Image: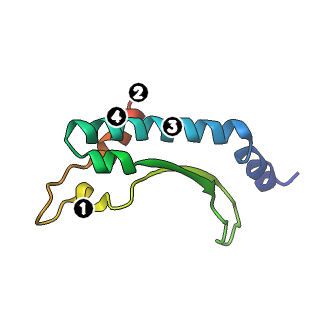
Amino acid sequence: MDVRRIVQQASQTPAVRRRLRARATQVAARAKATAARQGLRQLSADIRVEEGTRPGTKAQGFQRPYARVVAPGAAKYERGTSRFNKYRLMLRAARAVSSR
């Protein structure tokens, strides 16, 4: 048996995808709540979960599912600029959820 193929198939199961989606949904909910508390309603509305499968273009060709929290235009709030404070909403939300 090819171990790589077994791992590839295991990572594509619905249970793995459900768990990835559940964790990303928790992070998104936490980030939305934090953004709303900070008065960043537009950012809160833009936060969403994006799912898919990485193409596996590296030498191993291992295709992995992912679920990530995205928000267009969030970089200025995450890192800060001369006009915006640094909030780090996504980072704080991810850390809060992963520490449970």
What label does residue 23 carry, if any? 3
According to the picture, the residue beneath numbered tag 1 turns out to be 76
Upstream in sequence: badge 2 or badge 3: 3
For the residues labelled 4 and 2, the Cα–Cα distance comes to 7 Å
Residue lying at 66% horizontally and 40% vertically, measured from the top left = 16
Q: Relative to residue 58, is residue 64 depicted above or below?
A: above
Q: Earlier in the sequence, mark 4 or mark 3?
A: 3
Disc 1 and disc 4: Cα gap in Å? 21 Å
Q: CA distance from mark 2 to mark 3?
A: 11 Å
In the figure, 18 relative to 78: above or below?
A: above
- Amino acid carrying mark 4 in the image: Ala
Mark 2, Cα crowd under 10 Å, few <14 / some 14-19 / many 20+, is few
Task: Report the residue marked by disc 2.
Answer: 100
Which percent across, then down, holds residue 27? 42, 39
Closer to the camera in the image, 52 or 12: 52
Quadrant in the rendering for residue 93: top left
Q: Could you tell me which secondary element the residue under label 3 belongs to? A: helix
Q: As drawn, which residue projects farthest toward the left?
A: 82
Q: Is residue 41 left or right of residue 65?
A: left
CA separation, marks 4 and 3? 11 Å
Contact check, label 4 and label 2, Cβ < 8 Å: yes
Residue 51 in picture, x, y percent from top left: 59, 51
**Which numbered mark, 1 or 4, is in the foreground of this view?**
1
Proximity of marks 1 and 3: CB atoms separated by less than 8 Å: no
Of the two numbered discs 2 and 1 in the rendering, the one whose residue sits closer to the viewer: 1
